[in-house]
């Protein structure tokens, strides 16, 4: 029996949970699975599985060998596919998870373009603001925004994004514009509920000094679009990612403030588990996303243009005021 077949039987046994199911999938007798496992453990000189009449668990060595085997078998499958298909032809299914706001506004159009370029590819998208378990739920890839706390995942940054503090013009007419983050304490806040501390907004000034301001929560929601609409309606001040608020700021529906401060430290990442082989279709999709968004994504470029116009207008007002005082 070849080493590759032993490895395949071992991986199938672990994935299936029973020798009976593994034998059905591999199309062999149960005794063949048992024999291959016995030969594999004897050849390696270690116990890979702890077996009882009811349970089967991996040993520490078994877990390590399983992870490596999965990657090696996936490498072999991809190598075989690459020599039998044109490299530009992608097929199969990609299962992707993404947060709602980013997924609908920014990911969906890019996925549509990617599918147009690769018509034999199928995609399953789960757009939800819940934090999915990539391994347990069988996702190939997830788009995540913000700080990555799960060190077990492999991440590749696909775009930049900043947080912006903003509110409607009528809101600032009523409450006045804040000049320091601490001024936000007295304002009704619109807070993103999926954060561990929704009402606490971390920031850093231009010198790198860090702080946290806690706002009085007027509305808490687990969707950024809902918070943006509440801000446009004048219900509170908002601290949201640029990809959610850039159009509202560009149109004048929201006015950004405290621009000299950096709010949150975040990026847009493509993440996948280390046990999930990076197939050609996953790698090409990540490259496609990076190419489409670019070093300065359109939501940042649009926002930068708006901020430059605001700065120019403020400078013009300051110059006019100075000239008026001189004439007086």
Image (spheres, rainbow, N blue to C red):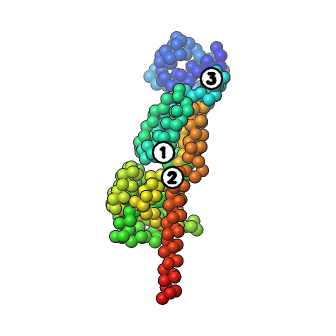
| Residue annotated with mark 3 | 85
The disc, 1 or 2, on the residue closer to the chain's N-terminal end is: 1
Distance from label 1 to label 2 (Cα)? 9 Å
Q: x, y (%) of residue 90?
A: 57, 28
- Taking 272 as reference, is 12 above or below it? above
Q: Mark 2 and mark 3: span between their CA atoms?
A: 37 Å
Which mark, by number, is residue 106? 1
The secondary element bearing badge 1 is classed as helix
Residue ID at (50%, 17%): 25
The residue lying at 50 percent from left, 48 percent from top is 145
| Residue 281, above or below 325 | above
Identify the residue position indicated by label 2 in the image: 299
Q: Earlier in the sequence, mark 2 or mark 3?
A: 3
Q: Decide: marks 1, 2 in contact (CB < 8 A)?
A: yes
Left or right of 323 on screen, residue 101: left
From this viewpoint, is residue 252 visible? yes
Query: Image quadrant for the N terminus?
Result: top right
Q: Is residue 218 above or below residue 276?
A: below
In this view of the protein, which residue sits in the foreground, 205 or 301?
A: 301
Does the image show residue 61? Answer: no
């Amino acid at each position: 029996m070849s080493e590759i077949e032993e490895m395949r039987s071992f991986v199938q046994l672990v994935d299936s949970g029973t020798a009976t199911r593994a034998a059905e999938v591999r199309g062999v007798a149960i005794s063949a699975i048992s024999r291959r496992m016995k030969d594999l453990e004897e050849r390696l000189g270690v116990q890979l599985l702890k077996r009882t009449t009811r349970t089967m668990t991996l040993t520490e060595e078994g877990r390590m060998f399983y992870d490596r085997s999965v990657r090696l078998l996936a490498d072999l499958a991809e190598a075989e596919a690459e020599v039998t298909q044109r490299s530009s032809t992608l097929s199969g299914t990609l299962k992707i998870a993404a947060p709602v706001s980013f997924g609908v506004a920014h990911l969906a159009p890019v996925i549509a373009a990617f599918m147009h370029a690769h018509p034999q590819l199928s995609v399953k998208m789960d757009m939800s603001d819940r934090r999915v378990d990539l391994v347990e739920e069988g996702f190939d890839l997830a788009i995540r925004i913000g700080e990555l706390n799960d060190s077990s995942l492999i991440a590749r940054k696909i775009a930049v994004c900043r947080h912006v503090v903003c509110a409607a013009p009528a809101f600032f007419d009523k409450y006045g514009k804040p000049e320091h983050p601490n001024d936000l304490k007295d304002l009704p806040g619109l807070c993103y509920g999926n954060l561990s501390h929704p009402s606490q907004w971390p920031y850093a000034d231009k010198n790198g000094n860090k702080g946290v301001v806690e706002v009085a929560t007027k509305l808490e929601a687990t969707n950024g679009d809902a918070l943006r609409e509440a801000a446009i309606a004048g219900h509170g001040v908002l601290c949201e990612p640029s990809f959610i608020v850039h159009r509202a700021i560009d149109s004048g529906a929201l006015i950004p403030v405290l621009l000299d401060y950096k709010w949150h430290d975040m990026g847009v990442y493509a993440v996948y588990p280390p046990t999930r082989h990076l197939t050609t279709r996953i790698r090409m999709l990540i490259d496609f996303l990076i190419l489409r968004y670019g070093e300065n994504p359109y939501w940042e470029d649009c926002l930068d243009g708006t901020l430059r116009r605001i700065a120019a207008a403020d400078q013009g007002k300051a110059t006019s005021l100075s000239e008026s005082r001189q004439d007086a």
